Amino acid sequence: MIYGVGTDILKLDRLVTSYQRTNGRLAHRILGSEEMQVFQARLARNESRGMAYLATRFAAKEAFSKAIGLGMRSPMSWKAVQTLNDASGKPVIKCSGLLEKYVQERQLVAQVSISDEVNMVIAFVILSVHQD
């Protein structure tokens, strides 16, 4: 059974402008520790790919917050949800802290899809209730 659906789309240059205006603090505000490691490695190799990574993770968090119906209020927070990749490269949602407990109590399972183009990124999240 579907619990919620969320989507987010944003212009990459808008996020880059915010990142530059905050001297990089934006990344520290929104990325979890595992996401931050990937972001820093990608940014060091190729700035535009690093910014695309940051933007897709921002969009995924926004989409997840819409799907769960909480917006950005407790137990939802920027760092409580991370979009990582499994061994095959598929993006997966990983929750932590109070948000992880909230998701487990409701037996929610998240599916996420993210994509980026030259100046746009999009994320789509479906939350369903796991039934045994």
Image: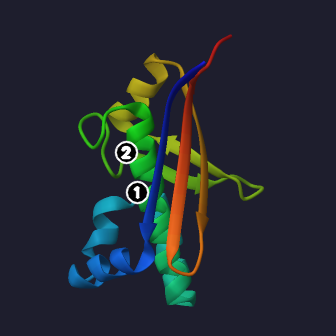
SS class of the residue under badge 2? loop
Q: Identify the image quadrant of the C terminus.
A: top right
Q: Residue at x 39, y 81 (%)?
A: 13
Q: How is the image coloured?
A: rainbow
Name the one closer to the observer, 58 or 25.
Answer: 58
- Report the amino acid beneath label 1: Gly
- Residue toward you, 64 or 44: 64
Tell me the amino acid under the disc marked 2. Ala
Mark sitting on residue 80: 2
**Residue occupied by mark 1:** 32
Give left or right: position of 64 versus 30: right
Q: Would residue 87 appear left or right of 2 to someone viewing this image?
A: right
Q: Position of residue 50 (x, y in %)?
A: 50, 79
Badges 2 and 1: C-beta atoms under 8 Å apart?
yes
Rendered-image quadrant of the N terminus? top right
- Mark 1 closeness class: few <14, some 14–19, many ≥20 residues within 10 Å: many
- Label 1's element? loop
As drawn, 85 above or below 104: below
Along the polypeptide, which appears first: circle 2 or circle 1? 1
Q: In the image, which disc is placed on residue 65?
A: none
Identify which residue is drawn at 40% across, 26% down: 101
Image coords of residue 40 (percent x, y): 47, 77
- Where is residue 6 drawn, in percent x and y? 47, 42
Measuring 32% from the left and 39% from the top, which residue is drawn there?
Answer: 76
Vertical placement of residue 108 versus 50, above or below: above
